[in-house]
Amino acid sequence: MALRKFFLNTWILFKMQVALYRFLGLFTAIVAILVPLGTLFLILFTSGTATEEHAYLLLAGNIVVSLVNTCITSLGQYIGNMKEARGFDFYATLPVSKLSLVFALMGSNIMLSLPGFIAVGILGWLILGIQISIGPGFFLAVILTAATMASIGTMIGVTSKTGQQANHISLVAMFVFIFLAPVYYQIETLPLALQWWGVIQPVTYGANAIRAAIAGLPISYYLVDLVILLAMATVSLAIVTRGIKWREG
Amino acid sequence: MHLAIEAVGLGKTYKKNNVRANVEINLQVQQGEIFGLLGPNGAGKTTFVKQVVGLLKPSTGKLKVMGEDVITNPDAVRNQLNYMSQNIFAVWHLKVREVIENSGRLRGLSAGEAKKQTQNLLEELGIEQHGEKAIFHLSGGLRQLAGFGAAFIGKPRLLVLDEPTSSLDVARRRKLWDKVRELNQKENVTVLLVTHSVVEAEHLLDRLAIIQDGKLRAQGSPGELKQKVDNRLRLEIIPHNGGLPSGFTRDLGQFGEVFEANNRIVVLTSRGTLQNAVGLVEQYGFDYIDDFRIGTTSLEDVYLKLGGGILGTA
């Protein structure tokens, strides 16, 4: 009964969050598409033609960029602004669990990444000439990566003192998670310090798993990445659920 | 009778700036009554309300809502109260109908029941024609009505309203007061209402507490508080443009304290001598006056005497 109520409340809150895109719609979709596409074009123009392996690296990297953009930057900024305007009060006085709200916020931001995914897929097919394989492993990798990213975005939002501070921190985080991590490159090609940094970064495992999944490799090939992502998602969700304060101190 | 709210030695000090927002509040709200917190801006009313609804953790004291400890069992409290906050920023993008309906669903109503109650509320609050508009497209008053709908849905045991009518016009304000009174009487809903409007307090409250500088200055029914301040009756005479006949004011003096305020002659008299004072007015004839009123001490008088601050009269 309690579990049914939890899922029902999460679904209702999810729909309430998704309704936001009714008004931001086109603009949100453009931003969600432009960030990964822009990065992809930049890399293609500076590095020339891509081998098949390089092409998968670029496409998987761009899917991760989509997730970072929506789940860290957009979500962090949204929560920061909502916190500043005391928007959580509305939810905090309703009989809903914090985890329901966190899941709803995550789910709606994963949905926001979809236009970016589709654009990247089409572009990969048209420009890079490769086929993307979409199976259960791909969705699992995306959801687990998104959950970890969204936890980070949520933490940025709830710990920032103002909406503006959340904006700044989430932009810095975006830079750290995209360019200082093995998103567009194999981890072995990075300097030693960044390799160590990459080991503790969820995007490393997210990019690995997504890359393998879209290349059509069997799930056993990237099972370790999925397990590490699952552990990271669980820990980060637990932290973020405790981090949202229904009450002031 | 059971208590809806029981605060014992309740206090709140904000650590950041060491401001004491509430100091030693001892207060009881009975189930089934409309209880008000009256006081000027920054008096500590909203701090108290946030403690009641579980948004703010008290620094000292104990607080029980519907028999449940707010600090140790906030979920049980949330299941029994509906709160209308001063802002609904979180749902600014939703349509009015969606805000009310989803609030009902999250409070456990079935889809059909939430839809039905939403439709009724939209009609009763006179905002049916705005049901499909997003909150951010509405004026402040209409937003407040939408917030009201979200607070009313689901038939709570305790309804907490924080300055609910501050942006409403007179007609809508009266409609809302009627709705609150109806919920209270028909459904036995306890209401905690924060206001700085004396008119609202006079119209709606069964009992009230006056808060200033975070401290509880007085509590009781409006009648009790008025008695505490001054139990004399008040005869107000509004003279005609031509003024009053000579000797009239002097003669009134034998029935009590007489003074002039806002172009009115005010006589503070005892219950025993009021009839004689009215008789004197009759004797001089009604040609000299536009109007006259008999009343008790106003809540504003009470507040000014007990609270000493500035109140709204809207």
Image: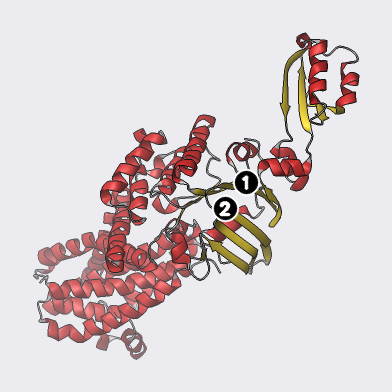
Marked residue chain, label 2:
B
Q: Position of residue A204 (x, y in %)?
A: 27, 81
| Image point (16%, 73%), residue name | A138
**Residue carrying label 1:** B207
Q: Nearer the viewer, mark 1 or mark 2?
A: 2
Q: Is residue B281 visible?
A: yes
Question: Relative to the observer, which residue lies in front, B90 or B238?
Answer: B238
Helix, strand or loop at label 1? It is: strand
Q: Earlier in the sequence, mark 1 or mark 2?
A: 2
Q: Residue B79 is drawn in which quadrant?
A: bottom left
Tell me: residue B283, above or below residue B99: above
Q: Is residue A48 visible?
A: no
Tell me: residue A192, above or below residue A213: below
Marked residue chain, label 1:
B
Disc 1 packing (10 Å; few <14; some 14–19; many ≥20):
many
| Image point (10%, 82%), residue name | A218
| Image point (35%, 33%), residue name | B129
Question: Relative to the observer, which residue lies in front, A26 or B290?
Answer: B290
Disc 2 packing (10 Å; few <14; some 14–19; many ≥20):
some
Q: Position of residue A122 (x, y in %)?
A: 13, 62
Tell me: residue B34, above or below residue B48: above
Q: Are marks 1 and 2 in contact (CB under 8 Å)?
A: yes
Residue B266 in the figure: left or right of residue B140: right
User: What amino acid does circle 2 point to?
Assistant: Gln
Give me the disc on residue B30: 2
Tell me: residue A194, above or below residue B205: below
Q: Quadrant of the N terminus of chain B?
A: bottom right
